[in-house]
Structure formats: structure tokens, C-alpha cells
Amino acid sequence: MRRIAVAKGDGIGPEIMDAVLKIFYEAKVPLEYVNVDMGKWVFDKGYNTGMTPEAKQTIETVGILFKGPMETPKGKGVKSINVTARKTWNTYANTRNFQTLHGVDTVFSKAGIPIDITVVRENIEDTYGGIEHMITNDVAISRRIITRPGSLQVIKYAFEMARRKKARRITCAHKANIMKITDGLFLEVFQEVAKDYPDLKADDVIVDDLCMKLVTKPDTFDVIVLTNLQGDIVSDLCAGLIGGLGFAPSANIGDHICIFEAVHGTAPDIAGKNIANPTALLLSGIGMLRHLGLMQSATMIENALLYTLEQGVHTGDFGNKAIPPVDTTQFAEAIISNFGKQPEQGAKPPAENAPATETKFALDKNIMLESKETAPENIIGVDFFIESDEQPAEIANKCLRHGGVKFRLINISNRGTQVWPTGSVYTTLVNQYNVRFESIDDTPLKQQDILGLYVSLSGDFKICSSELLLMLGDKRAYSLAQGQ
């Protein structure tokens, strides 16, 4: 018996979780369930993480969390429990499989276009770091964190998964044409990893082009790997292709702890009515069984689900309206009654149980992710983000007085567009500028040099923040302003 932690969730969570666990029980799945306290009601008791310390300890002991949908209280300044859980336990790869389900009508199923797409989304970094600041009354900023080791983790996982899936194609979606440093790094890592998988067709696509192609030719895609925010958006788009989030399983994979969950809402308007659709949570649970090596149980349950859907059994949110809907309990009972039956389309082949995916336990310290090979690093300048409602030329005149013998003022930009030494009077401004200083003759600088310039410049301006300008080997490690 393998022990797993179960958090039933909020709203419809308890009733759909009970339905899924009933299916597992009748299928004689060898799991032992440890209920843990997580969700909105835990927030309401004063736990800002949305989970009790006992729940956290249990999950870190058993390594698997199976959870229903959860709500984060609005207007209380607390972080999403879903994001907190994924980040706390470094579940770096969010995997969602989107496949045509016969009995769930969509535009594509009616047109006879089969969909089988796996989206692998980086799950830890990007703007989901949640590091945001108001730096003036009018200007808010958010830090977008993309790291080489973090990108390598998720991209390596995506290639391994694509190989196991016998994928036709693995695609990196990105916006490296605009975000040349951050998305550029993610794409660079993808291209490096692809060299180790010559058996897989690897390509890349700009994310907005991807979205257009997904809604016109979704059957041309197989495995797609993306950064966090873009992956979040594309995942929901793909859910729409197959009937909605009610049919979209989700797995959050880490080296130590994994989370399998339904990602649809808590639907408080129908909570307690026993009419919710448990399909997404059941599919997530089936993915969990495969992760644990319980292939026989996973195959039997999935084929029973597919057979049940083919027979037209449905809850009230989908299906043939000429056939009366069933409630949550009846839907689960129908699946149980169909154990051993094979659907006409999409049947999963028999599979023998396998060893569980390896998980590393008993950590005694935080793991540091760091690239083994690093280029020589030199500081060659600094960006100061200042608050001012003055015109660019006035700002430049003041800045020029502070350069001294080590710095030269290179340019001034506003919202990323250069406004000095060249620019246009038609560029509309806000009260936050970036003033860029670089070293004279590109001579390497020390942090003490930067601090001296900071002190001098602060006599004329409020400095909201600053960033060092680095050269990594012979590569400039910072972006240029638009128009620079």
C-alpha cells in the first residue's frame, strides 16, 4: 500500500474527490489516503499559506498530494494556495494532457479532427515569482525571473516525457523576438537540450502564432513546452479545444514531491448539490496512478471512463441534452459498472505495473541549482530607474554632472523607449525613467563605483531601483532600449 496525502478542496471539491476515491476503492487500487487540511477554510483560520503545519509535514513525508480545487480568499493579501504549493515543493513541470474524449462534443470532434496535445509549463519562475512593486504613484513593475537551471529542469523533463510518449514533435513556444534576454534564455536551453534527442523533431514557434495555429490546426501539435505565464494561458486555450477545464487533468512534477489536481474552479454555486463533473479530477488521478507505477489500475479505470462517455452518460455540464444527466455519484457508479469494458475509440492498451517514478526523500538542506559552466562576468555599467516629471533633456543635463571620470551617460528611456539622446516629442511619458550609465572605454567596474554614482545621483533624483549591466564573456547580458 502506497500512502498519499489527500486534500479534498473547497466548493465542489469534497464531492468530486469522494466520487474519485470511490472509483479507486472499487478498482482495488492499493493506496492508503491521509487527509490533510488545506484550502480557503484553512486561510480563514489564520494560516497564510492555506495549509496547516501538520499538512505540510505529511505531504513532505509521503511525497504525493492529490487535491481538489481550492479557493484563495479575495482581498486579504494572501497568495494563491495552488501557486504556493507548487513553488514551495519545487514542482517545476506542470503537465496537462488534452485529448479528444468521445461523448464530449466540440467543434473539432464534430469535424473529425483528433486532438492529443501535452502542454508542459515551467511552474516555478517567470512573473509567478510574484515580486511586484509600485515604484511611483503611477508605475508598477513586476520582476520576470527566468533561470538557466530552472529552464533546464523543465525542458529536460519535457523531452524525456515526449520520448516516452513516442511524440511526433516537441515544440518550444516563446516570445524571444521581444523578450530577447528572458525568453531568449529559455529558447537557448531548449535548443541545447534538443541536441541530446536526435530522435525527436524539435522546433520552436512564437507564442501568439502558436495560439492562432492551435485554434486552426491543433492536430499538428504534440508536446509543447513553455514558460510559466505563457504556459498558463496556452493550457486554458487547449482545454477549450477539448470541452473545457472539466476535462483537463493536471500534474505538477518535482524531484521530491508531486501534486495531482483538478485546475477548474470550486463552483460554489453548485457545491453540495452532487451534480458536479468529476472527470478532470479522475483523469488527474489516473495520471497519478501511472506516476506511481500502477499501470493496470490506471488503464482499467481510464478505459471504463472512456467507455462511459461513449455511451452518452454525462453530468449536466456537457453531453447530449436529449439524454437526461446523471449526478456525481451516479456518474462514478456508471464508471465502476464499466470496469473491464473497452471503448471503441481511444482505448488504452494493457500495461504491466512498473516501478514508481523515482523520488528523492529526506533532504537535510535546500538544493542550490547552478550551472556548472559560467562565462567570465564583468560589470560595465548600471541602469538607474528614477522618478521624475521633467523632460528628457532636463534629466540628461543633471545626469551628465554625475558621470565623473568613470561613467558616461549612454541613453535615457521611458517605458522602454529611448527619449535621449535621440527620440520623438510624440513619445508619451510617465514619471519613471531609466537612465543608463556605462563605463568609459568599457573598463570593468566594481560595485563600489556603482554605489558612489548612486549616492551622487540621489542628490538630484529619487532612485526607485537599479540593475547592474553585465558582460558575460563577450556577450552583452542586458537589453537595449527601443530605438537605441
Image: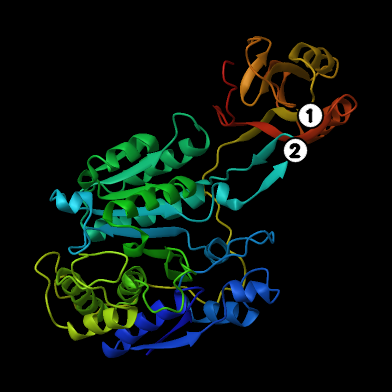
**Reading the chain from its start, which is encountered first: label 1 or label 2?**
2
Q: Label 2, on which residue?
A: 135
Crowd tier of the residue under label 2, counting other residues whose Cα lies within 10 Å: few below 14, some 14–19, many 20 or above: some
Q: Residue furthest left?
A: 344
CA distance separating discs 1 and 2: 8 Å
Q: How is the image coloured?
A: rainbow
Q: Is residue 483 above or below residue 253?
A: above
Q: Looking at this view, is 218 or 178 the one in front?
A: 218
Taking the spot 78% from the left edge, 14% from the top edge, the residue there is 396
Q: Position of residue 433 (x, y in %)?
A: 72, 25
Left or right side of 366 for 242: left
Residue ID for mark 1? 387
> Which quarter of the rendering shows the N terminus?
bottom left
Q: Position of residue 209 (x, y in %)?
A: 34, 34
Q: Say which quadrant the C terminus sits in.
A: top right
> Is residue 152 toward the left or the right of residue 109 in the image?
right
| 200 and 386: which is toward the camera | 386
Residue 67 visible from this viewpoint: no
Instruction: Tell me the amino acid under the disc marked 2.
Output: Ile
